[in-house]
Image: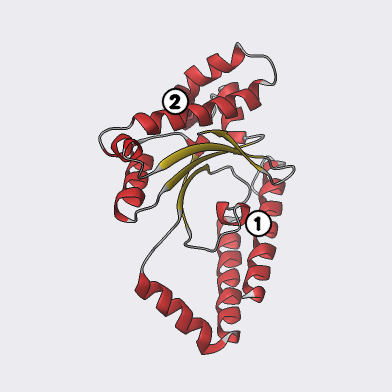
Amino acid sequence: MKRIIKFLLVTFISTCTLACFAQENSKPAFTADEVLRELMMGNANFVQEQAKNGAENGEKRESSLEKGLHPIAVVISCNDLKIAPEFIFGQKLGELFVIRNIGNVVDSNVLTGVEYATEHLQVPLVVVLGHTNCDSIKTAITEDKDLDHVLHLFDELEAVIEESKSQEGDLLENTIKNNVINVVKDLKKSKPLIKKQINKGEIKVVGAIYHSDTGEVEIISE
């Protein structure tokens, strides 16, 4: 298991490095075929590490699948988050029901995921996780007209951005925080299921910010 975790960490760091390099250049650093080969090589290494652990690891995996999925929390996070929520909260794969989208906003797909997890998997906690220096929200603030779908994101965040402009401090960080708070409010008002679950004390919805410079998660809304 230690070997697998080490491999995943190395792969993650390498991926982040490649992504950062690509952002700094006007054209992609790698072609699609090169990236696909990299992914398949990574999977081959993963399978090899699995095999080294022998039958015991396979039996544990099979036993876990037979028991079914039992995540302990739903985490709604941004696609721009530079690290997986499982790493941030020190959980194993499968222990969190992670829903990711641009800007960690609420839409019908997010609501469907939350309702499924809380109703059918009996997950008691929903965490709306924003993060510092969010590129997605930064793009919405600047209204990048070259990205058509960013206009949709801007529509989702327009009220939050305007609210944040009237506050003291950094516009980006205020918007990130206010967005999390508003998403928590929207989830708590969601009818019929989520609001009913909250009123009955079956689930709790909280908002949090991941500070990428320290690794700390700060609860900002309950």
Residue at the top extreme of this rendering: 166
Residue type at numbered disc 2: Glu
Q: Secondary structure at mark 1?
A: helix
Residue 153 — which label? Answer: none
Q: Residue at x 47, y 80 (%)?
A: 60
- Above or below 143: residue 147: below
Q: Quadrant of the N terminus?
A: bottom right
> Which mark sits nearer the N-terminus, 2 or 1?
1
Q: Quadrant of residue 69?
A: bottom left
Q: Foreground residue, 147 or 70?
A: 70
Q: Nearer the viewer, mark 2 or mark 1?
A: 2
- In the rendered image, residue 131, in percent from the top left (x then y), is placed at 61, 38
Residue type at numbered disc 1: Thr
Locate residue 109 relative to residue 18 in the image: left or right: left
Residue 15 — which label? Answer: 1
Locate residue 64 relative to residue 171 in the image: left or right: left
- In the rendered image, residue 160, in percent from the top left (x then y), is placed at 51, 20
Residue 156 — which label? Answer: 2
Q: Foreground residue, 123 or 1?
A: 123
Q: Residue at x 41, y 78 (%)?
A: 63
Q: Residue at x 33, y 35 (%)?
A: 199
Locate residue 98 relative to residue 139 in the image: left or right: left
- In the rendered image, residue 64, in percent from the top left (x then y), is placed at 42, 74
Q: Quadrant of residue 133?
A: top right
Q: Secondary structure at mark 2?
A: helix
Q: Label 2 vs label 1: CA separation?
A: 29 Å
